[in-house]
């Protein structure tokens, strides 16, 4: 899918700018950073609310942000949140190989067309250093609430790929990631933490792997 098509599809999904769980999602990413994490790419950075959380908790990191919607990038306050910003598609990240210790992408992969998912994951793998970490959160299609009929994540027109855990693990492995770990995420993690044994309680899940 073209960058223009992605932008048009996502520009009207304003939840990216107002999601009340965004900061907690990024704090979850940070808890799993390595002690040597010094360079981070925030894919789907929207208006920078998650990036601001990273900057507050990790003031010394070099932080770059990427989003397909230029209007959101333009809303980011130029107050030192990001060291570099890109209006670009994740199918072609405009940086050299091995640029980042970590890539974070909160509620992002579901916005990628099935034909592009493997391209995106391979591209993320390229821009990570050896031993670098990718962190993704995405809606859980097997959540109890979805099964009870609260299926807005499935019907949202901006959601092109709602992936089951096993599917996403396989795609990460195909892209070259190893040591893949899954944790619960979303609002249910406020009650159950991230390691409750029944993944169905979580509306989203965190999946991360090592290059």
Image (cartoon, helix red, strand yellow):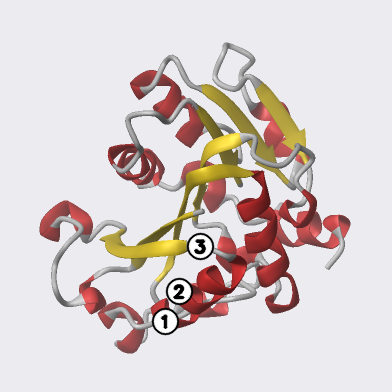
Measured from the top left, where is residue 179 in percent x and y? 37, 62
Q: Quadrant of residue 150?
A: bottom left
Residue 193 appears in view = yes
Label 3 sits on residue = 177
Q: CA distance from mark 3 to mark 2?
A: 9 Å
- Vertical relation: 136 (above or below) 58: below
Residue at x 16% of width, y 62% of height? 195
Tag in front: 1 or 3: 3
Tag in front: 3 or 2: 3
For the residue labelled by badge 3, is the local secondary structure a helix, a strand or a loop? Answer: loop
Q: Does residue 90 appear left or right of residue 32 in this picture?
A: right
Could you tell me if the residues under marks 2 and 1 are in contact, i.e. CB atoms within 8 Å?
yes
Q: CA distance from mark 1 to mark 3?
A: 14 Å
For the residue labelled by badge 1, is the local secondary structure a helix, a strand or a loop? Answer: helix
Ranked by sequence position, the earlier of labels 3 and 2 is 2
Q: Quadrant of residue 56?
A: top left
Q: Residue furthest top?
A: 79
Ranked by sequence position, the earlier of labels 1 and 3 is 1
Q: Which mark is residue 206?
A: none
Label 3: few (<14), some (14–19) or many (≥20) C-alpha neighbours in 10 Å: many
- Vertical relation: 29 (above or below) 204: above
Label 1 sits on residue = 166
Which quarter shows the N terminus? bottom right
Measured from the top left, where is residue 66 in percent x and y? 67, 39
In the foreground, 42 or 4: 42
Label 1: few (<14), some (14–19) or many (≥20) C-alpha neighbours in 10 Å: few
Q: Does residue 159 appear left or right of residue 200 in this picture?
A: right
Q: Does residue 74 appear left or right of residue 138 in this picture?
A: right
Residue at x 15% of width, y 55% of height? 193
Label 2 sits on residue = 169
Measured from the top left, where is residue 198 in percent x and y? 17, 77
């Amino acid at each position: 899918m073209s960058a223009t098509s992605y932008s048009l599809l996502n520009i009207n999904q304003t939840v990216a700018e107002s999601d009340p769980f965004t900061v907690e999602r990024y704090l979850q990413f940070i808890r799993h950073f390595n002690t040597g994490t010094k360079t981070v790419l925030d894919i789907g950075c929207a208006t920078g609310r998650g990036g601001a959380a990273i900057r507050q908790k990790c003031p010394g990191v070099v932080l770059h942000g990427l989003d397909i919607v230029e209007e959101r990038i333009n809303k980011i306050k130029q107050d030192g949140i990001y060291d570099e910003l890109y209006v670009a598609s994740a199918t072609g990240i405009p940086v050299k190989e091995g640029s980042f210790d970590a890539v974070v992408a909160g509620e992002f992969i579901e916005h990628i067309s099935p034909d592009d998912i493997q391209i995106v994951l391979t591209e993320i793998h390229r821009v990570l250093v050896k031993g670098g970490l990718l962190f993704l959160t995405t809606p859980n299609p097997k959540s109890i609430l979805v099964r009870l009929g609260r299926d807005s994540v499935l019907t949202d027109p901006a959601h092109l790929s709602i992936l089951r855990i096993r599917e996403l693990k396989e795609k990460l492995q195909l892209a070259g990631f190893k040591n893949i770990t899954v944790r619960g995420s979303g609002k249910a993690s406020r009650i159950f933490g991230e390691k409750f044994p029944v993944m169905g309680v979580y509306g989203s899940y965190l999946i991360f792997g090592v290059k």
